[in-house]
Image: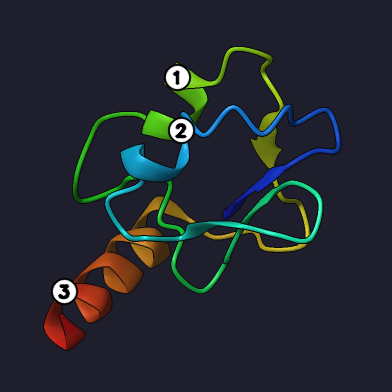
Amino acid sequence: MALMITDECINCDVCEPECPNGAITQGDEIYVIDPALCTECVGHYDEPQCISVCPVDCIIVNSAHQETKEELQAKYEALQAQG
């Protein structure tokens, strides 16, 4: 499952540099997560780094982009191959 940032985001700039896949960018009003790049840090870390550093807990699972751990691992490997 890709993650998403809710409108409670305060644009604190903490999450963006923590994303190992470059999935987090500044949107029109708040930061956004590209589901094509988000692997929930599978392949990099044991837990999503953006969630662990977010001071307002505004990063949640995006139910519109549900993926298994195996699918996230495959996405990670595909992204690494492109890299």
35 left or right of 41 in image: right
Q: Which mark is residue 50?
A: 2
67 left or right of 49 in image: right
The residue that appears at 46% across and 59% down in the rendered structure is 38
Asked which quadrant contains residue 46, the reply is: top left
Which is more foreground, mark 2 or mark 3?
2
Q: CA distance from mark 2 to mark 3?
A: 19 Å
Viewer-closest of 75 and 71: 75
Q: In the image, residue 20 lies at what x, y percent?
A: 27, 51
Q: What residue sits right under mark 3 in the picture?
A: 80
Asked if residue 36 is positioned above or below residue 66 in the image, the reply reads below
Label 3 element class: helix
Question: Is there a contact, CB below 8 Å, between mark 2 and mark 1?
Answer: yes
Which is more foreground, mark 1 or mark 3?
1
Label 1 element class: helix
The residue that appears at 83% across and 28% down in the rendered structure is 8
10 Å crowding of disc 3: few (<14), some (14-19), many (20+)? few
Q: CA distance from mark 2 to mark 1?
A: 5 Å
40 left or right of 76 in image: right
10 Å crowding of disc 2: few (<14), some (14-19), many (20+)? many
The residue that appears at 52% across and 34% down in the rendered structure is 13
Q: In the image, residue 22 lies at what x, y percent?
A: 37, 60
Q: Which mark is residue 9?
A: none
Q: Amino acid at mark 1?
A: Val
Q: What residue sits right under mark 1 in the picture?
A: 53
Label 2 element class: helix
